């Protein structure tokens, strides 16, 4: 079934790093308003706005202390109202980031819940420690660990009990066995939908419901997850929220899902079940990682093809993305941003990118924008922004990076290896300020930003690419315009054709139209297998290198689209 959010391109904005308007070094809502024309010019019709709610910023806004207020760092509610209005003038819709697994520990609900006699006590998951005492205090309620490499329980002196937090200790989990919590969430949704929001990106949305608080199985990863990941209670909550709120608005939801498999994803996204419209999974970004996004192994294009095929065929509709605020820059991950493609070989500060930086960024753009689903483009992806050349852990703001360092240290991993892994996987790689031009602080601010500016901003910036016909930015514009006018590229079936360690070929088919895509993920020329050459001798629509004809070879980091 066709719909406006399937036809659209989504542009994700990480507010604190997008555009500063008042010289405090932090991006803000007026700054976003000032750049709406650039987003419109790119061809995006939807903005996904990472959290702008009131927050103490223990996890950069994903710890919300008031869902009905704007963080003063970003502006006011009047600024937010103006953003909705100015975006609408440009036919751009906005989806909000919905963070409802947990709140901040500074939220009024949590502060009141610390009193055991408060009606808010049951808004969170409080438990006494086990009878056996350790160092004068009862043991933890269970053996669960959290997603930020630490224990999942925190003791509160005022309460005399522990509270559950699957993420940072300043992010206590809400209790979804309490119907009042679900009603509070419905009211939050209605508030923002009535203001003009067109939907929500739902943070860690498949771990809301804790079926049991029994001990978890022993695991090197997150212990206890079998008691709360994609539980039936979670499905029931999503269906209730959809029925009572979302179904009454012309909106959509995309869920960020933790360690989801295809079977779980099908349940979450089945149109007949009415839970989520689409979801983000992580498999494709972990094909060259041994544990989640950490600890590298060799990239193989055929492995990427295998994972993408599974999801393209397995789900009716995909949320397509290669970057977001939690992932490394894709041109540094799968591409050739550095002088060679070995994992962890970073650019020296203020140096030009590697030889194949531009070509590889275009190959990745062609890949994302020719798959079936709704594409999500992260700020800076459209100009090929790269990972940052961090020199030490002190330069990192990311709570996950610091947590990982502590965990790896406990495991006796040498310091040099810990740092190599962390600096290439840190979420801060995607959170450095947007590179608008080659002026000081890259046009993001006129003051020192909250996080370092990448030293290559003199070479990689929006202004330098805006009027350059062969730039990455203009390649994105070309592909987006092409996609908008092609039902085949939007709604066509995905058909895998061929893959090896460097080359992948696939097709999109819709009614009597067929597109073929071939992508070379290497710095070597590759020959197309003889039995597939005829697929590429048809009219060439797009080449990342600007060729007008395609034969039986693809040049280094070349991608082609033929019709």
Image (cartoon, rainbow, N blue to C red):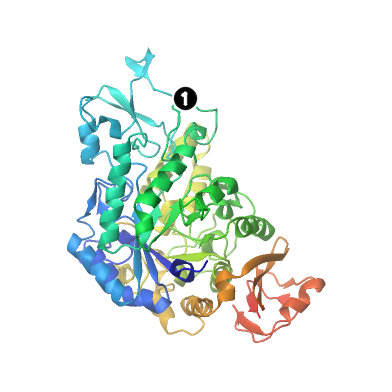
Residue under label 1: 214
Report whether 474 appears left or right of 494: left
Rendered residue at 48%/69% (across/down): 384
Q: Name the secondary structure under disc 1.
A: loop
Residue 377's spot in the image, x, y percent? 45, 66
Q: Quadrant of the C terminus?
A: bottom right
Report whether 340 appears left or right of 2: right
Q: How dense is the environment of label 1, judged by Cα within 10 Å: few (below 14), some, or many (20 and up)?
A: few
> Residue 511 lies in what quarter of the image?
bottom right
Residue 546's spot in the image, x, y percent? 60, 83
Q: Is residue 164 above or below residue 367?
A: above
Q: Is residue 84 above or below residue 261?
A: below
> Residue 521 lies in what quarter of the image?
bottom right
* Closer to the camera in the image, 14 or 521: 14
Q: Is residue 116 above or below residue 64?
A: above
Q: Residue furthest bottom?
A: 548
Asked if residue 395 shows in the view, the reply is no
Figure label count: 1
Rendered residue at 37%/64% (across/down): 250
Residue 67's spot in the image, x, y percent? 25, 50
* Closer to the camera in the image, 237 or 329: 237
């Amino acid at each position: 079934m066709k719909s406006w959010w399937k036809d659209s391109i989504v542009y994700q904005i990480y507010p604190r790093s997008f555009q500063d308007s008042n010289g405090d070094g932090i991006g803000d809502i007026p700054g976003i308003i000032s750049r709406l024309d650039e987003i419109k010019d790119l061809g995006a019709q939807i903005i996904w706005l990472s959290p702008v709610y009131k927050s103490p910023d223990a996890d950069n806004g994903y710890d919300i202390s008031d869902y009905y207020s704007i963080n003063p760092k970003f502006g006011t509610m009047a600024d937010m109202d103006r953003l909705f209005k100015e975006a609408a003038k440009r036919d751009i819709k906005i989806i909000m980031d919905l963070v409802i697994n947990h709140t901040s520990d500074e939220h009024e609900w949590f502060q009141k819940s610390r009193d055991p006699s408060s009606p808010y006590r049951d808004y969170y998951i409080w438990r006494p420690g086990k009878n056996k005492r350790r160092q004068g205090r009862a043991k933890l309620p269970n053996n669960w660990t959290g997603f930020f490499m630490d224990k999942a329980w925190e003791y509160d002196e005022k309460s005399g009990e522990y509270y559950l937090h699957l993420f940072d200790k300043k992010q206590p989990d809400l209790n979804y066995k309490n119907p009042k919590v679900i009603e509070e969430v419905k009211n939050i949704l209605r508030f923002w939908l009535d203001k003009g929001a067109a939907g929500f990106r739902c943070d860690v949305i498949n771990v809301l419901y804790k079926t049991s608080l029994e001990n978890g199985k022993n695991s090197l990863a997150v212990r206890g997850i079998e008691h709360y990941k994609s539980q039936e209670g979670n499905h029931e909550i999503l269906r209730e929220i959809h029925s009572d709120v979302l179904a009454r608005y012309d909106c959509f939801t995309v869920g960020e899902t933790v360690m989801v498999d295809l079977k779980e994803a099908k349940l979450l996204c089945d149109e007949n079940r009415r839970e989520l419209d689409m979801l983000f999974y992580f498999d494709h970004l972990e094909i060259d990682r041994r544990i989640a996004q950490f600890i590298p192994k060799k990239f193989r294009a055929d492995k990427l093809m295998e994972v993408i095929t599974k999801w393209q065929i397995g789900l009716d509709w995909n949320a397509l993305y290669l970057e977001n605020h939690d992932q490394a820059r894709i041109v540094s991950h799968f591409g050739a941003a550095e002088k060679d493609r070995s994992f962890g070989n970073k650019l020296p500060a203020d140096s030009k990118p590697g030889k194949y930086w531009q070509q590889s960024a275009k190959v990745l753009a062609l890949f994302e924008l020719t798959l079936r689903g709704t594409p999500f483009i992260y700020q800076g992806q459209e100009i090929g922004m790269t990972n940052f050349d961090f020199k030490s852990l002190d330069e990192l703001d990311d709570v996950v990076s610091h947590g990982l360092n502590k965990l790896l240290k406990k495991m006796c991993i040498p310091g040099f290896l810990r740092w190599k892994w962390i600096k290439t996987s840190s979420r801060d790689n995607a959170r450095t300020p947007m590179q608008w031009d080659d002026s000081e602080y890259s046009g993001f601010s006129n003051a020192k930003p909250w996080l370092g500016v990448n030293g290559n901003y003199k070479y990689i910036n929006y202004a330098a690419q805006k009027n350059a016909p062969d730039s990455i930015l203009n390649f994105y514009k070309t592909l987006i315009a092409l996609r908008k006018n092609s039902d085949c590229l939007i709604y066509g079936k995905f058909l895998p054709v061929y893959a090896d360690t460097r080359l992948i070929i696939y097709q999109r088919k819709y009614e009597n139209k067929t597109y073929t895509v071939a992508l070379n993920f290497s710095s070597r020329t590759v020959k197309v297998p003889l039995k597939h050459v005829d697929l590429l001798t048809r009219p060439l629509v797009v080449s990342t290198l600007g060729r007008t004809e395609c034969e039986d070879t693809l040049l280094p980091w070349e991608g082609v689209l033929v019709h």
